[in-house]
Image: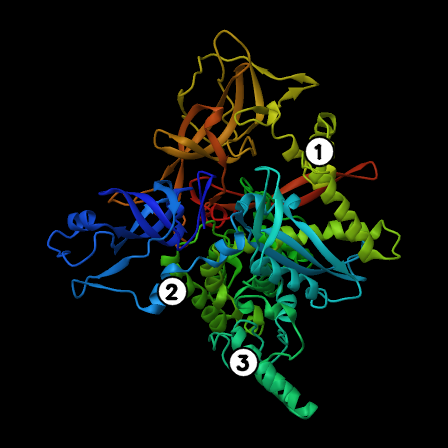
Amino acid sequence: MVSIAGVLHVFVKDCVTFLHPQLGPTRGIIDKIYHRKDLGTEVLVKVDTLLDANQFKFMVPNSCLFYLPDSTLILYEQITVVSSAIVCVQEKPLDVVRWNRVTDSFQRFSPDECASYLATHPLKAKAAGRKVVMLPLILFADDTSGNKSKKWHKFESWYLLLAGLPRHMNAKVENIHFLCSSDSMSALDMANPIADELILLEGSGLEVYDALHNEHVLVIAPILLFIADNPMASLLLNHLGGSAIKYCRICMADRDESPDIISAIRTLQDSLQQMVVISSQRTQQLKDQHRTLYGVREDSNPLLHIPGDAYRCFPLELLHTLLLGPVKYFLIEVMATFSKAQKEEILARMKAFNFSGFHVKVHGNVCYHHKSFVGRDYKAWSQMALFIISPYLTEGQQKVLLALSKVFRIAYCDFFDPAEADTLHQICVGFVHTVRDFMPSLLCKQKVHYFLHLVESMQDYGPTSAFSAERCESFNSSVRLQNIYGNKQAPSRDIANHFAIVEHLRYICGGGLFNSNERCSKGVKDLYDTHEVQGFFNSIPSKLLNADREIYKPGTARMATSYNGKLNLLKVHTTIIDGTILELQQLETPYSVITHLGSMDDNVQEYRAVVSNCSELVHSGDYVELHPPFCEFKYGQLLTTIQLKPGRTLCLVQGFLALQLPNGQPLFNDFECPLFTLSRTLFTVDSTRIQKAVSIVHECGNHCKFEKSVILNTVEREQVADTKLVFLHDWTQLLCNALYHFII
């Protein structure tokens, strides 16, 4: 089904008039409607053409039509056109024959073919002339604690997301909708009414009033996928869980077999048959044996009766499978092998690491507090571990870390090409084989096996950001707070009432219709749009709410430098304009170049940060991407930002030169990271050309060294000298952090 120009509603099997590229206005039967990403928002329609005698002679000049009546139409060929080429919908003609290209002859429809030709699409019959809105859904199920300690009083909850929203909007907290929560019922027990509603929404649909078009429409809301961690997914699929002999919920992998093998894939039909066999056993002992044999329970499960294969609707969830899986296990195991001196050097390397482009830094002492890290800490650590701890690993551990980093890059890519599925799958298989050969202690964890199914999930649903659980996990805090500050007499009801009130207020204050044709007043709408109310209702950070303010616009200079409470103005000796190039004669560190900036006539104001085109705050010293590039420089280091006059802001950048092979191709390291060298060229660009902050990592060589530095700390009003290890880079060669550039 497709809507043409928002007015004409066209379904598969409709007879339409469309603009044929050769024949002009032509009739046809719609066979397929689909969308191609490379064409933007344009929808493609595959049409079986219905040609009259003159049109057919034009397309097939040597044909013989003398025995066909003039009113007969010929079903000739399939042609693909854009949706805008469809002019109108009309009744299907009855006198139709089909042209057989193999025999070069005409054939009449058989009774079954005639019935299929005259049939109306079921969705069109349900719509009964109304517009149809397809609204695919995503359901998330999880458990969380109901108190501040996050240890006791377990709640299990269901949340709803709209799958059709753009990816960057679907991850926002305000687009996650609460369904239900209970501290006395499991998610599977609460699934009965949810499953009934899903079957109704996908089957017969729901008639609702569309306030935008001022008419009633038919909403069809099929379930696209479920998001849940592995234990919850096993519960909702009647699987025995990761501790069972058949530990994998996706395939029939057995603990007695090698974990690097994919067994027969589980399907809904096979599982239902296995449940019937278990139920038919006469004794409890026989039932237990068959449960162990199949890895499933025979309990009643309403989710298994939803249209589609439920086992394909639970893609691999990465927060618990990757970050809290192999990444955590590897870090714990290798940290246990490091000496105290090695840990001190690792901490020094981390302090010298440039976190430019990172949204989250690794907090705490990674050498001693890594067991208490959460998902975002392991995610940030995974993007830098390859460049921090590699010198302290054995050869086998280095191979495992390299293979794990490649899987990490696949798991968090922002684009998936189905043509590369086999290559990506072989990388995942190689990771499992590397773990088996060099760190077999990790192979006993069933999460390692799940990476054999990662690419399969991406083939079904695209990049993993489409089924990420991290935002939904953060929504658990809202449920927890409602229980903490409630009266705890009926927590499930109170939590549901709170979210119902919030949803109603969002709708009414957002301008929705109520009482047939009434809307809230302009004053209420303006109050609702204020930053404070939006932050209260939607849990939106103040940074995002203030994004429309002048100081958050791209190219705006921020964080002015000052001295003794006064703005720091620079008196300079050369004229600086956009594109000025300065050559450095001596370069000790990138931070020793704040010299000779500004204009001959006026003092200029220096700033320590600028807002990039991606609305990120980029600080002096960060590595940046320039768009468009300046000469041969696409990347560089932001040294300082100066404002010549209001509305005229320049950035001083030190460029990075890409290393190349003799044939002109870029030079990469073993991890396919492009290599750069720090040039001696400084140039000024307009602040609006700062695209975003990126992660450029120093490739340490023999010239990088550790030094002991004395730091004075004040302890009980006395200064105490403390010696700490400092890691110094030689600043000769850099490489682009490929792990960061694939993170969304």
Where does label 2 land, which residue?
A: 115
Residue 660 shown left or right of residue 546 in the figure: left
Say few, some or many: other residues with alpha carbon within 10 Å of mark 1 (under 14 / 14 to 19 / 20 or more).
few
Identify residue type, mark 1: Glu
Identify residue type, mark 3: Asp
| Residue name at image x 21 percent, y 55 percent | 69
Where does label 3 land, which residue?
A: 254
Identify residue type, mark 2: Ala
3D distance between C-alphas at marks 1 and 3: 61 Å
Mark 1 against mark 3, which lies toward the viewer?
1
The reply to whether residue 13 is in sight is yes
3D distance between C-alphas at marks 1 and 2: 48 Å
Residue 332 position within the rendered picture, expressed as x and y whole percent measured from the top left: 62, 63
Local secondary structure at mark 3: loop
Residue 295 position within the rendered picture, expressed as x and y whole percent measured from the top left: 59, 80
Position of residue 90 relative to residue 423, above or below, is: above
Q: Nearer the viewer, residue 273 or 519?
A: 519
Q: Which of 546 and 30 is in front in this view?
A: 30
